[in-house]
Amino acid sequence: MDKRQPKAPIRLLIVDDHPVVRAGLSSMLGKQAGLKLVGSAASAEEALAVLEHTPTDVVLMDLRMPKMSGIDALHAIRRLGSPPRVVILSSFEFEEEIEPVNPEVIRELAATAARDARVAIEQLAADGIA
């Protein structure tokens, strides 16, 4: 008899300034086995506030947002005591967006299309979540 503990779901925070995108991702990913949607945020600032009090394994975040960009938010997230992994979601060409970013930070990024979001979330979670 296998007595292994069931694998805990990946706790996911979705961050996008477009309400329709946020709602679509929440609807699509919130129903997936193995994922637990712990919240959604309309801005990087709102996401940082959520992360202060909500245990999160992976943040799925838009790259281009008003005020604080996804890259700036990634830097702020990495300064948290126990930072979650981050999947950057963008419909734009990605390489020129991250070119000026520190190579250590780039390792934290997983450029993806919406249809590949679940795969990227699972890969990041498996790579860095105990």
Image: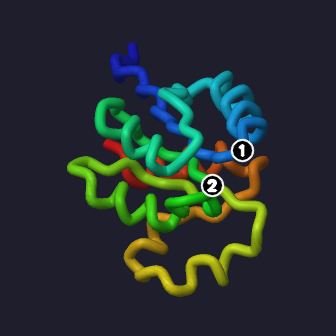
The x and y percentages for residue 122 are: 55, 45
Residue 22, given in percent of the width and then of the height, sits at 68, 37
Q: Which of marks 2 and 1 is in front?
A: 1
- Can you say which quadrant of the picture contains the C terminus? top left
Q: Which amino acid does label 1 sit on?
A: His
Q: In this view, does 62 lie above or below 71?
A: above
> Given contact means CB atoms under 8 Å apart, are the residues at marks 2 and 1 in contact?
yes
- Judge the density around disc 1: few (<14), some (14-19), many (≥20) Cα neighbours within 10 Å: few
The tag on residue 62 is 2
Q: In this view, does 54 lie to the left or right of 99?
A: left
Q: Please state if 13 lies on the left or on the right of 112 as rendered.
A: left
Say which of 103 and 41 sits in front: 41
Q: What residue is pinned by disc 1?
A: 18
Residue occupying the point 75% across, 56% down: 113
Q: In which quarter of the image is residue 118?
A: top right
**Secondary element at image label 2:** strand
Q: Nearer the viewer, residue 70 or 85?
A: 70
Q: In this view, does 107 lie above or below 34?
A: below
Residue 111 percent across, percent down from the top left: 64, 64
Identified by mark 2, the residue type is: Asp
